[in-house]
Image: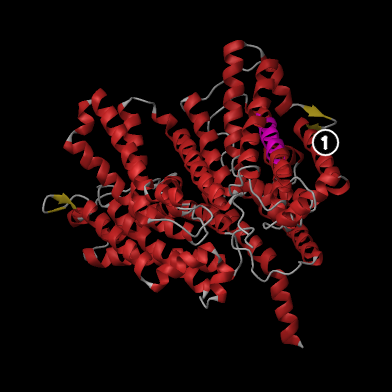
């Protein structure tokens, strides 16, 4: 048991070692990999994935899953761009984007707990509705002609560090404190590991799950802002397959797919590993057509390894009794 | 005890009458949409259109049959669309490389079955939630199709192979008879064989099914393998119908198949459902898709409408009983 605990404790360490190994290996083949501009590029990509993946982690901890997050990110990016074009002040449209994200996600939370729809199916339907809705409203046209102030987060820096990375670090710290220190954060773990026991302990299970979805929506809103402000145009097909990346980052980082456990720092390392692997494949000149297959395979392997722990811990399969 | 995700903690035994009402409603919906579609379009009820509709929708219909079995056990298979794409590309690739169609078809069916078996092994023996396994394999298989074909359209299949997807038998499209054969087979298994009964038991409660001596893991393995095999068959029909293979073959098939199954009265949390219901569901989804296309509704709007329909159906079928109970209580 102790060895087990030590192993889980060092999961982030193992991923970090893996990341270093890949980075050193690729740099040996192609020194530009270790260039500061490339590292900064990787970290910029990691920033929005991490923020969105933290939302996914919270949902998976409650025992749910969100397959609509990629479509939702696209929707929020477009809303943010459109609001920016309408001439609102910067702070106003950022706040509105985050609020819309919160409302949309809270809505899926309500459908899931109040109307007994499995989260998988609910978000699958919402995925179709969001993607279809985007194409109907925009007609597939990109959003262009954004004001200069729009790129304040994506292209700006604070003390030489890109704003996206600063925001990621702040969000990471806030989410860690939220999950570890607040009552709602602890309730989310309790509900995910055993809903009946949580109910008997006096936790309002439905309200906790809806709150978790709302928080995840807020994080998705922040992620959309960090993502879309890097560009001068916003395409309608952004965030394709993003939900898979988010689930993979959470699971690789040690979040139990059955709910009840997961760490924000693990999710960050998971997102970092995935981004490094993707960049490494580019440097090794592997055709991008294989990108999707690699991601699918990675998530399967990550879940298998994660499941192995659960099997060993409980002495039987994933079904908890 | 935790069996499914978000299962109602106070769930009591659900009565089959509610499911029956659901199928009745869907049947009424089907009649309504047929009438509606023939009113808003000129040629909906023409023989040519009906034949076309049958042809285009039979691939999804074939996938909906094993999907019924899988959903009955409170699992799901999201990877069927990816499997169709992978099998279509592999069929065309092997045929191009060897020129031996029999070999290509055999290997395609084998690949489909192996893909399904991988799902079944992970869901059954490794006890990983089915939605996460099949979500990953959906991208894995779809990604393999993309990687192998590099997003190109592959052709070069012999003329004789076109029979399967474009031929007629007794004035009906060839694939219609294939579907009828499998529908009868699946219905027989579900109604008359012990295997079919086991599926419902697993859907109600996998733990007690295990204690009752049902081999749950093996049942999942068989279910998913059959699903993969049917996806391979659907891929053969797809490639034959359009005489080319693309890596985006089968995109969205899984949503349509799940929708047909759920509309047909199969409970998404397992236990209740029938092949007959699924057939009605297939017809409804087919009619809506075809009718809206004829009415020049854009495919994006159709996607939105079908997504909403699926969500509403599940909300209704999962809550009908509680609502009716509440309604009766208020009346008294």
Q: Position of residue B261 (x, y in %)?
A: 70, 51
Quadrant of the image for the C terminus of chain B?
A: bottom right
User: Which residue matches tag 1?
Assistant: B181
Q: Quadrant of residue A121?
A: bottom right
- Drawn side of residue A65 relative to residue B19, left or right: left
Q: Does any portion of residue B132 appear in the rendered image? A: yes
Q: Where is residue A11 in the image (x, y as percent from the top left)?
A: 38, 46
Tell whether position B82 is magenta: no
- Residue nearer the viewer, A178 or B287: A178
- Residue nearer the viewer, A237 or B97: B97
- The number of numbered discs placed on residues in the rendered structure image is 1
Which residue lies at the image location 27% right of the left edge and 41% below the top edge? A42
- Drawn side of residue A14 relative to residue B153, left or right: left
Q: Does any portion of residue A101 appear in the rendered image? A: no
| SS state under label 1 | helix
Q: Position of residue A179 (x, y in %)?
A: 38, 65
Which residue lies at the image location 80% right of the left edge and 37% below the top edge? B182
- Drawn side of residue A274 relative to residue B152, left or right: left
Q: For the magenta stretch, what is the residue range? A: B223-235
Which residue lies at the image location 52% right of the left edge and 35% below the top edge? B140
Q: In this view, does B11 lie above or below A313?
A: below
Q: Position of residue A252 (x, y in %)?
A: 42, 45
Tell whether position B231 is magenta: yes
């Amino acid at each position: 048991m102790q060895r087990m605990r030590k192993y889980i404790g060092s999961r982030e360490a193992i991923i970090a070692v893996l990341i270093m190994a890949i980075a050193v290996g690729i740099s040996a083949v192609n020194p530009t990999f270790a260039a500061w501009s490339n590292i900064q590029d990787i970290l910029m990509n990691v920033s929005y994935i991490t923020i969105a993946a933290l939302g996914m982690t919270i949902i998976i901890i409650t025992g749910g899953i969100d397959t609509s997050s990629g479509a939702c990110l696209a929707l929020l990016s477009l809303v943010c761009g459109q609001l920016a074009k309408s001439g609102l002040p910067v702070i106003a449209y950022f706040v509105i984007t985050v609020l819309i994200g919160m409302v949309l996600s809270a809505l899926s939370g309500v459908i899931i707990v109040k109307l007994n729809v499995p989260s998988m199916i609910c978000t699958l339907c919402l995925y179709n509705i969001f993607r279809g809705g985007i194409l109907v409203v925009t007609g597939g046209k990109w959003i262009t002609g954004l004001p200069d102030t729009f790129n304040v987060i994506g292209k700006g820096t604070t003390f030489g560090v890109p704003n996206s990375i600063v925001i990621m670090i702040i969000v990471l710290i806030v989410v860690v404190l939220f999950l570890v220190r607040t009552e709602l954060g602890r309730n989310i773990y309790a509900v995910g590991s055993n809903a009946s026991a949580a109910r008997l302990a006096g936790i309002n299970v439905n309200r906790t799950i809806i709150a978790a979805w709302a928080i995840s929506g807020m994080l998705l809103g922040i992620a959309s802002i960090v993502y879309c402000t890097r560009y001068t145009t916003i395409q309608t097909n952004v965030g394709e397959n993003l939900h898979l990346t988010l689930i993979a980052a959470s699971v690789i980082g040690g979040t139990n797919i059955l709910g009840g456990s997961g760490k924000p720092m693990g999710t960050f390392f998971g997102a970092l590993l995935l981004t490094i692997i993707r960049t490494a494949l580019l440097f090794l000149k592997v055709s991008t057509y294989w990108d999707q297959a690699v991601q699918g395979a990675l998530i399967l392997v990550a879940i298998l390894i994660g499941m192995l722990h659960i099997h060993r811990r409980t002495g039987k399969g994933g079904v908890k009794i | 005890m935790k069996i499914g995700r978000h299962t109602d903690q106070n769930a009591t035994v659900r009565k089959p009458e509610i499911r029956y009402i659901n199928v009745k409603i869907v049947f009424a919906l089907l009649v309504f949409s047929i009438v509606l579609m023939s009113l808003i379009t000129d040629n909906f009820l023409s023989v040519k259109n009906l034949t076309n509709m049958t042809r285009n929708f039979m691939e999804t219909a074939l996938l909906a049959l094993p999907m019924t079995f899988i959903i009955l056990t409170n699992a799901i298979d999201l990877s069927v669309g990816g499997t169709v794409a992978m099998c279509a590309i592999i069929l065309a690739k092997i045929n191009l490389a060897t020129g031996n169609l029999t070999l290509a078809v055999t290997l395609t069916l084998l690949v489909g079955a192996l893909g399904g078996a991988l799902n079944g092994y992970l869901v059954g023996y490794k006890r990983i939630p089915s939605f996460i396994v099949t979500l990953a394999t959906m991208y894995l298989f779809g990604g393999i199709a993309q990687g192998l074909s590099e997003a190109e359209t592959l052709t070069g299949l012999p003329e004789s192979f076109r029979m399967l997807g474009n031929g007629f038998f007794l004035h009906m499209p060839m694939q219609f008879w294939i579907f009828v054969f499998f529908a009868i087979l699946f219905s027989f298994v579900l109604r008359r064989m012990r295997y079919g009964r086991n599926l419902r038991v697993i859907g109600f409660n996998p733990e007690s099914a295990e204690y009752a001596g049902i081999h749950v893991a093996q049942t999942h393995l068989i279910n998913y393998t059959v699903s993969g095999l049917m996806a391979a068959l659907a891929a053969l029909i797809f490639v034959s119908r359009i005489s080319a293979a693309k890596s985006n073959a089968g995109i969205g098939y899984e949503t349509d198949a799940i929708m047909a199954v759920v509309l047909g009265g199969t409970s998404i949390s397992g236990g209740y459902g029938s092949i007959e219901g699924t057939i009605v569901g297939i017809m409804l989804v087919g009619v809506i898709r075809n009718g809206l296309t004829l009415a020049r509704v854009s495919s994006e709007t159709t996607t939105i409408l079908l997504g909403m329909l699926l969500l509403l159906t599940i909300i209704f079928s999962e809550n009908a009983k509680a609502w009716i109970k509440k309604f009766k209580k208020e009346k008294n």
